[in-house]
Image (cartoon, rainbow, N blue to C red):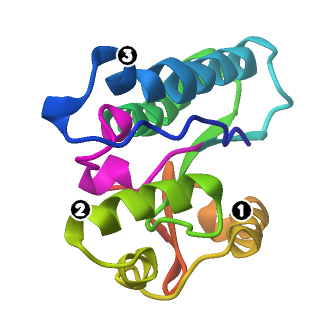
Amino acid sequence: MLNAGVTPPMAPIHEISWEDFSATWNTDTRAALLWTQAALRLPLEKGSRVLLGSSGAAVSGSPLSGGHAGAKRMIWLMAHYANGVSAELGLDLRFQAIIPQQMIGATDHGRACSEAYAKKKGITAEAFLAGFGKPLSPREFGQHVVSILTEPRFEGATALGVKGDTGIRSLDA
């Protein structure tokens, strides 16, 4: 599973530079592309699964984080594209995007983002995070990843949303 990335600079669209806007593209999306290409070229053992970390911003946007939402949506699309290539080449690999559907306040990334959004709304970060429902800890997120990899009901999905109060669900249309 690849779940690496940069915490995007937090500012409204009219105050952000191109360098800040494209930070997530140049780090997260690039890493996902390289990871996906390596998995397709190795190739991995038939039946292997490759997980790509995305973000709830890919679903609902993220107006204070520049190109973050688009970059994270691209990771989701790359999973679809890679599944097509895998089928064309007869590799029998399955690519899946994991999409946390809430900020995880117990991480540096989640803390920085929640503080920026809370400040904009004039509330505390805790109050902002409470709007997502039951908190999702890094440990619980990891447990959900294990479930995704071990429970047959998740094998066929390309995009899987993860949330503290609802667990795991397919986001495929």
On the question of residue 9 being in view, the answer is: yes
Sequence-wise first label, 2 or 1: 2
Q: Which residues are magenta?
A: 53-69
Per the model, the C-alpha gap separating discs 1 and 3 is 32 Å
Q: Residues within 10 Å of mark 2 (few under 14, many from 20)?
A: few
Q: CA distance from mark 2 to mark 1?
A: 32 Å
Residue 152 location (% of width, % of height): 70, 66
Q: Is residue 157 left or right of residue 41?
A: left
* N-term mark: 2 or 3: 3
- Given contact means CB atoms under 8 Å apart, are the residues at marks 1 and 3 in contact? no
Residue corresponding to mark 1: 145
User: Which element carries disc 2, helix, strand or loop?
Assistant: helix
Q: Position of residue 101 (x, y in %)?
A: 44, 65
Q: Amino acid at mark 3?
A: Glu
In the rendered image of this protein, does residue 138 appear above or below residue 127? above
Q: Is residue 43 left or right of residue 67?
A: right
Question: In front here: 82 or 56?
Answer: 56
Q: Residue at x 47, y 34 (%)?
A: 75
Disc 1 packing (10 Å; few <14; some 14–19; many ≥20): some
The quadrant in which the C terminus is found is bottom left
Judged from the image, the secondary structure of the residue bearing numbered disc 3 is helix
Q: Which residue is mark 3?
A: 19
Question: What's the amino acid at mark 1?
Answer: Val
- Asked if residue 58 lies left or right of residue 144, the reply is left
Magenta span has 169?
Answer: no
Which one is in front in this view, the residue at disc 2 or the one at disc 3?
Answer: 2
1 vs 3, front mark: 3
Viewer-nearest residue: 92 or 140: 140
The residue located at (54%, 26%) in the rendering is: 82
> Circle 2 sits on which residue?
120
Query: Is tag 1's residue or tag 3's residue first in the polypeptide sequence?
Result: 3
